[in-house]
Image: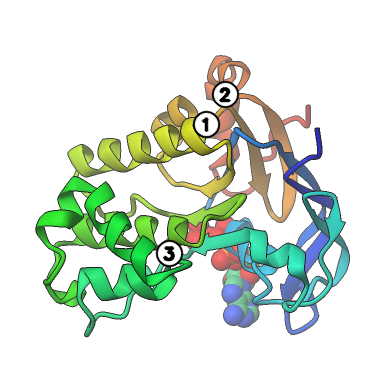
């Protein structure tokens, strides 16, 4: 089976300065993989670069076995990105936001009905939704283009625990139903390791630990140490 997303020695950064160095990472279809690590570790830079917002400084990105070089590459169309700043058109209604991202108008209506929370709010301006409702809409919009690889940045930031678990359930059920690959960045380490199948710990732009969520939960003390500035966990 072809790997859904593969980073090979990816170096990425801003204005020619590397924030992430020689990153090797893969996500298989049907898998949720988390990128965790302290502030400034390079997590968002990695997602932005995969999504084509920055040109890699080195290395390569493969989607479904195809090398992605420019934003116009067909392989990039298999990707969808849910950025930290939700990316909604706040003046438009819930339905209009979904229809804009859906492959067809008909599909947009069907999508609205697919999410019970959103169906009730279909005609409401999305800027008037609560933070949690906006995030569910943003996730639904990211899925509306029927991606094979979904990138999610800080989906649960600032949200109540009940919404966090609703969003995480939605990601898991979508992955199980559609077999898409998800790479997500999260701050809630324990909750993330419950959701993800595997995780990579990024610190100062390099992977310092990686493994299945079960393996990383067993090393939770090392993991917490890696969040303390100036300390580096052993690579594995
Ligand atoms: N637009 C930018 N221009 C210059 N440097 C940037 C820019 N955005 C981020 N950086 C720097 O790149 C490094 C990695 O930042 P990045 O946002 O990727 O980290 P992060 O792991 O996502 O952090 P956080 O958890 O705080 O969001 C940091 O040193 C940051 O200051």
Helix, strand, or loop for circle 2? helix
Query: Circles 1 and 2: CB distance less than 8 Å?
Result: yes
At x 52%, y 49%, the residue is: 185
Q: Mark 1 points at which residue?
A: 196
* Tag 3 and tag 2, C-beta contact below 8 Å: no
Q: Which element is circle 3 on?
A: loop
- Assign ligand 1 to one image quadrant: bottom right
- In the rendered structure, the answer to whether residue 147 lies left or right of residue 125 reads right
Q: Assess disc 2: are there few (<14), some (14-19) or many (≥20) residues with their C-alpha within 10 Å of its C-alpha.
A: many
Q: Looking at the picture, how far across and down is residue 47, in whole percent?
A: 62, 61
Give the Cα separation between the discs numbered 1 and 2. 6 Å
Quadrant assignment for the C terminus: top right
Looking at the image, residue 106 sits to the left or right of residue 69; the answer is left
Name the spot of residue 100 as percent of width and height, x first.
Answer: 39, 76
Label 3 – label 2 distance at C-alpha: 23 Å
Q: Is residue 37 visible?
A: no
Q: Name the residue under label 2.
A: 213
Q: Point out the tag, 1 or 3, that comes first from the N-terminus.
A: 3
Q: Nearer the viewer, residue 64 or 165?
A: 64
The quadrant in which residue 192 appears is: top left
Q: Is mark 3 within 8 Å of ligand 1?
A: yes
Residue drawn at point x = 32 percent, y = 43 percent: 167
Q: Which of these two is toward me, 159 or 176?
A: 176
Callouts 1 and 3 close, C-beta under 8 Å: no
């Amino acid at each position: 089976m072809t790997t859904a997303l593969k980073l090979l020695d990816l170096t990425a950064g801003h204005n020619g300065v590397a924030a992430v160095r020689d990153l090797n990472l893969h996500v298989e279809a049907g898998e949720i993989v988390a990128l965790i690590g302290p502030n400034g570790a390079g997590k968002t830079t990695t997602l932005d670069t995969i999504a084509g917002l920055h040109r890699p400084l080195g290395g390569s990105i493969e989607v479904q076995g195809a090398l992605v070089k420019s934003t116009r590459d067909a392989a990039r169309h298999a990707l969808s990105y849910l950025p930290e700043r939700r990316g909604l058109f706040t003046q438009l209604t819930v339905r209009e936001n979904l229809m804009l991202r859906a492959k067809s108008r008909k599909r947009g209506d069907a999508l609205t009905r697919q999410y019970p929370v959103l169906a009730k709010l279909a005609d409401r301006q999305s800027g008037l939704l609560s933070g949690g409702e906006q995030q569910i809409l943003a996730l639904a919009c990211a899925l509306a283009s029927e991606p094979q690889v979904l990138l999610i940045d800080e989906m649960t930031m600032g949200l109540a625990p009940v919404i966090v678990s609703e969003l995480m359930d939605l990601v898991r059920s979508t992955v199980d139903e559609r077999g898409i690959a998800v790479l997500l960045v999260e701050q809630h380490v324990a909750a993330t390791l419950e959701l993800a199948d595997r995780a990579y710990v990024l610190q100062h732009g390099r992977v310092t630990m990686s493994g299945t969520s079960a393996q990383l939960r067993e090393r939770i003390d090392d993991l917490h140490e890696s969040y303390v500035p100036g300390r580096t966990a052993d690579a594995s």
